[in-house]
Image (cartoon, grey):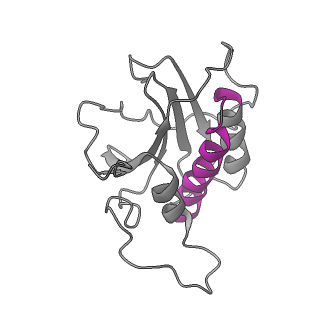
Amino acid sequence: MPDPAAIRSWHRTLPHSPQAVPLARALVREALAGPDRDTAELLTAELVANAVEHTEGYRPVELYVELLASHCQVEVLDSDPAPPGDLGSPVPLEAPDPLAEGGRGLLLIRALAAACGHRPTDWGKAVWFRLAAPTKIPPQRDAPSTPPAHEPGPPPQPRQHANPAHHATPKPSPSGA
């Protein structure tokens, strides 16, 4: 269920497979405009890749993109109730192995997003990030052209924005306040 304050919102049910990542990037690319679009694509790809890699394959991955006056929010829902590593802590609990091929996605999200976090859902969790509002709103379009890969899974829980600090990692302001 989209946030009523959203200027625009998009939802896509993605397959629980590697094909989910390019489908998610395509939705973000079509939905957003401005300088943060590339960052949103990168961070969305990280969240979706984590959802596919670290959860069982019997449920699809849900992707929500919302444009609000103050920010853009991307949220990925998956079937694993376990929190995503140390995303909810203000600093990483441990540095990734310098020789490991993976383990840097959550660091990227924490470093590039204005805020990030997670929340439980009835059938797993939602992991999200926020970026500053885009400098321009793309022209109104119907749903992006990438077709859904299969039938949608169980309906995701509505997002509750009343307490955005719930499991959130806000970035400190540049002035240090």
In the rendering, at what x and y percent does residue 54 appear? 52, 64
Q: Is residue 33 magenta?
A: yes
> Which one is nearer the viewer's eye here, 1 or 44?
44
Q: Which of the pair 170/14 is nearer the observer? A: 170
Camera-side residue of 36 and 41: 36
Q: Quarter of the image for the N terminus: give it.
A: top left
Could you tell me residue 172's position as x and y percent? 34, 52
**Does 39 sit above or below residue 46?**
above
* Residue 142 picture location, percent across and down: 68, 15
- In the picture, measured across the screen, residue 75 lies left or right of residue 166, that is right
What residue sits 51% from the left and 30% below the top? 133
Q: What residue lies at 43% left-to-right and 23% top-to-bottom?
A: 2
Residue in view at x 40 percent, y 79 percent = 94
- Main SS category, magenta section: helix
Magenta part of the chain:
30-55
In the image, residue 114 above or below residue 140: below
Magenta run includes residue 92: no
Q: Residue at x 73, y 30 (%)?
A: 147
Q: 103 above or below 56?
A: below
